[in-house]
Amino acid sequence: MQWIQDPSQSNVDTLKKVRRDASRHFRNKKKAYLKVKIEELESNSKINNIRDLYRGINDVKKGYQPRTGIVKDEKGDFVADSHTIMAGWRNYFSQILNVHGVSEVRQAEIHTAEPLVPEPSALEVKLAIEKLKSHKSPGIDQIPAELIKAGVGQFAVRFIDLLLLCGIRRNSLKSGRSRS
């Protein structure tokens, strides 16, 4: 502030020195921070903590990115205050989620694009089991194909019972998905 009141050469030199010291201080702080960050990345690499390693690398590559917490309110104005934002979300979800009266809610018909497909027969399951490739790694159930093929007769019947119990359709079998 002295430089503004009295812009003499000594005050200008003092201001330059203070700025230089501040820049040096922050440069050293940044260097120390990056050194700690690099050591952290190295330790994550050594202990095979890959997720944290890549997160740290991405953080360093992207640099500082400030978050903007600006939302439009009901009137269409921009709001940046966190309490006002939270109150707005509270009102929004209370209007959507709070249903007053059961008579207002009607049962909606559900239309699907999938036609109704009959459950697979024992013959179809046997044919599917015979088509399984041998010497491949087991799926998520950890049952090898060879084991399934070895007990085709008994397994097919039990498998169909299980499918009927779970309500799985042929479409989900073909696409490789299972529904429960």
Image (cartoon, rainbow, N blue to C red):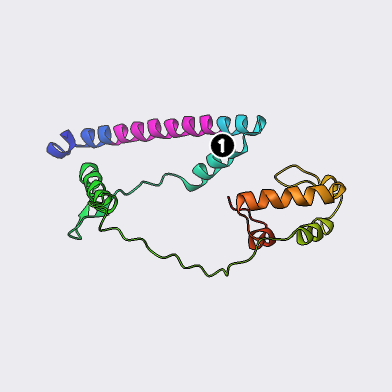
- Residue 136 visible here: no
The majority secondary structure of the magenta stretch comes to: helix
Residues rendered magenta in the picture? 16-38
17 part of magenta stretch: yes
- Residue 77 visible here: yes
Q: Tell which of 111 and 35 is nearer to you.
A: 111
Q: In this view, does 126 lie to the left or right of 31?
A: right
Residue plotted at (86% across, 52% down): 134
The percent position of residue 78, horizontal first and vertical second, equals 22, 55
Residue plotted at (52% across, 46% down): 61
Q: Residue 21 falls in which quadrant of the image?
A: top left
Q: Tell which of 11 and 147 is nearer to you.
A: 147
Q: Is residue 133 left or right of residue 59?
A: right
> Callout 1, which amino acid?
Asp
Vertical position of residue 127 compared to residue 145: above or below: below
Residue that numbered label 1 is attached to: 52
Residue plotted at (36% across, 46% down): 66
147 part of magenta stretch: no
Q: Element at badge 1? A: helix
Q: Residue 127 falls in which quadrant of the image?
A: bottom right
The percent position of residue 69, horizontal first and vertical second, equals 30, 48
The percent position of residue 60, horizontal first and vertical second, equals 51, 42
Q: Tell which of 146 and 59 is nearer to you.
A: 146
